[in-house]
Image (spheres, rainbow, N blue to C red):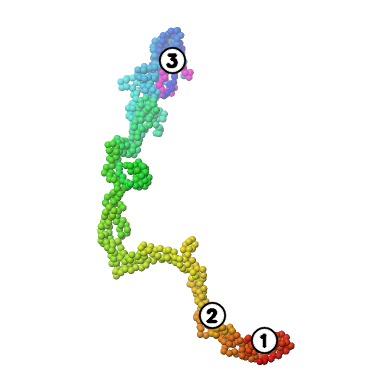
Amino acid sequence: MRFRSTTRRPQQAGTKDRSSMINLNSSMHLRWIAALLAAGLLANCGGEDATVSGSSTPDTATNQDADIAVSGTDAQDTQTPPDTQPVDTQIDTQPDAATDIEQDVGTDVADTADTNPGGCPGGAGCSCTDDSKCDGGKCIDTPDGKKCAKACSKIEDCGNGYTCASIGSTDSTSYCVPQHLSICSPCNANADCQAQGIQDAYCIDYGAAGKFCGGACTTDSNCPDGYGCSDVKEGTVKQCKLKDTAATCTCSAWAKVKGVATTCSITNDLGSCTAQRKCGDAGLEDCKAKTPVAESCNAEDDNCDGKVDNLAADFTCYKKGFLDAGSKTACAKDADCPTAGEACDEDNKLCKTLIGKCKGKPQCGSNGELICADAQIPTQEICDGKDNNCDGAIDEGFGWKSPVDGSEVKVGAACGVGPCAGGTVLCKDNLTAVCTTYANAAKESCDGADNDCNGQTDDLACDDNDACTIDACDAGNKKCSSTAKDCSDTDQCTEDKCDSKSGDCSHPSYNGSCSDGNACTLGDACGAGAGGSWVCMSGGSSDKCDDNNTCTDDSCDAANGCIHAPNANATPCYSGKDGTQGVGTCKGGTYACAAGLIDKTKCVGEVIPTVTEACDGLDDNCNGQTDEGCKPTAVTVTFSSAYVSGNTGTDKKLQLLVGPSGPVGAATGSGKYNVNFGFLAWLMQLIGK
């Protein structure tokens, strides 16, 4: 007969089993074939356990073909790489050309009546729902769902990714089960990971994400891709764990069916809140733990410490007080009120001017409401020895003003100097504070003592109530004096004034005269200069410095003013009769200068009128006539050029005879004559009466 053996390589990780499909096509009876398999084929399996399964139908024809499926394991097969999928137990009716191996058996196999010796359903690796569906009596979970288990006696009986384990405590048979079925599945305890006889899988803590199953290992090679072999229990236990710390475990098909869960957490400085997250149809749920917050009164465990409304030791509560003022805008909390000094009045939901906040003892009511026990309602501060507005200060804003330095001395502080020393500032009423010893103060007097307790001696004893005077006390003589306050600003174009009440100096503009610094200018006055400033403006004229003294030279120096330097000049003088100076022989003289002064005792060089004429051809009496009453005294004749002069005494005609000519020339008025004539033939002069 012809015997054809077809071997299929598994397609998934998880087993080293190899299934062999043997198709027998022969005209021999099926019983012969069964005998051949039992006697010869199984003897060649190297001692390995084998499961022979098949089905037979009565021969109805001599040449009828029959297919028999035989499954088993071959521990000596090193050519087929490890795989993680269960054994393919389906009858292969289409041989794989790449792996089919044909053998000639050489004997005929008789027909057999055995039924279903190892195929699906029921065979190892076949899908199942419970143990009753499997020939071996065990339906197990695998990464691909529930499959019929293969019995084993040692790990070598199982494929890669599978191990040989006893599933139940009462089950004497061991089966090939997935070695890492639960790896990276959510868990809360080791037992959640130890499925189907695998007792060395641990529940590993992945931090806030939760706990997830590992898998036993000694080196990384024992772990699936993406996993590393890590210490998880003080170096005594190693488990396969995700290498990428940022990676997240996902839910396998097994985990989704099981609905396995773990406890995740969200942690901060206030606490750690947990929640269960499980595998569902959509995969691993997000962590639904709430974020811890500070405990408040709300009937909830805000910080997840297992206690409800257990307020922190530093939790504070306040009662607020308001003025009926402010923006009064709508609010729900203080942060809704941006205006400085305002807060939210929760009673009417309006922003108002805050008086203060008084601290109380926080307590939570049965309904989660906050009770601020023992807290007072803030009010505006008054002088009563209490902190009315709860700002931590007592009677702030109230105090006694010290006369020593003007500082405010707080209520309760020591006060007083001099006769008033040893006092204490106390509230006189709700609005006033006083120093208890200042009843001893008296009006200051000029006696060398601090009578009014202001820290100064005799300072006000001589006060004349005029702030523009400087008052002084002579304590030894008990006498007062005062001097005017100097308000001068050295500006000649301002007025210097002083306010008698305040003592303040003022300097209004002055419109009067001033000096521009040049002593030789006249009419200097204050006015608006360049830029509008009020300055001294130079006058429009210069000082000539004339002192009406001819005995001095007058000049002006810008720094020193007029200068009158003595000189030797003579001063004109004339003592004759008015109207005669400059007539006839009369002329003026001069007074001499000595040390800048005129000597008027003698008019040097003057000629004054004589009483009578001197008949000298001059007007000696300075009356405008010459030698009136005198006769001529001489005639001088010069031929060719004649000059005739003389004095007629009185107005008379002078006749000069030239040739046959008649008289020429005449003497009138003063009687003086002076005649010049040309060619003279002869001259004859007769002077008659």
| Range shown magenta | 78-98
- Identify the disc placed on residue 569: 2
- Identify the disc placed on residue 22: 3
The C terminus is located in which quarter?
Answer: bottom right
- Which of pointers 1 and 2 indicates the residue nearer the eye? 1
Residue 97 lies in the magenta stretch: yes
Label 1, label 2: how many angstroms apart (C-alpha)?
46 Å
Q: Which amino acid does label 3 sit on?
A: Ile
Residue 57 position, x and y percent, is 41, 10
The earlier-in-sequence mark between 1 and 2 is 2
Q: Which amino acid does label 1 sit on?
A: Ala
Residue 482 position, x and y percent, is 34, 68
- Identify the disc placed on residue 666: 1
Q: What element carries label 2?
A: loop
Overall secondary structure of the magenta stretch?
Answer: loop
- Which of pointers 2 and 3 indicates the residue nearer the eye? 2
Q: Quadrant of residue 254?
A: top left
Q: In front here: 42 or 370? A: 370
In percent of the image, x 45 and y 11: which residue is there?
Answer: 65
Residue 568 position, x and y percent, is 53, 80
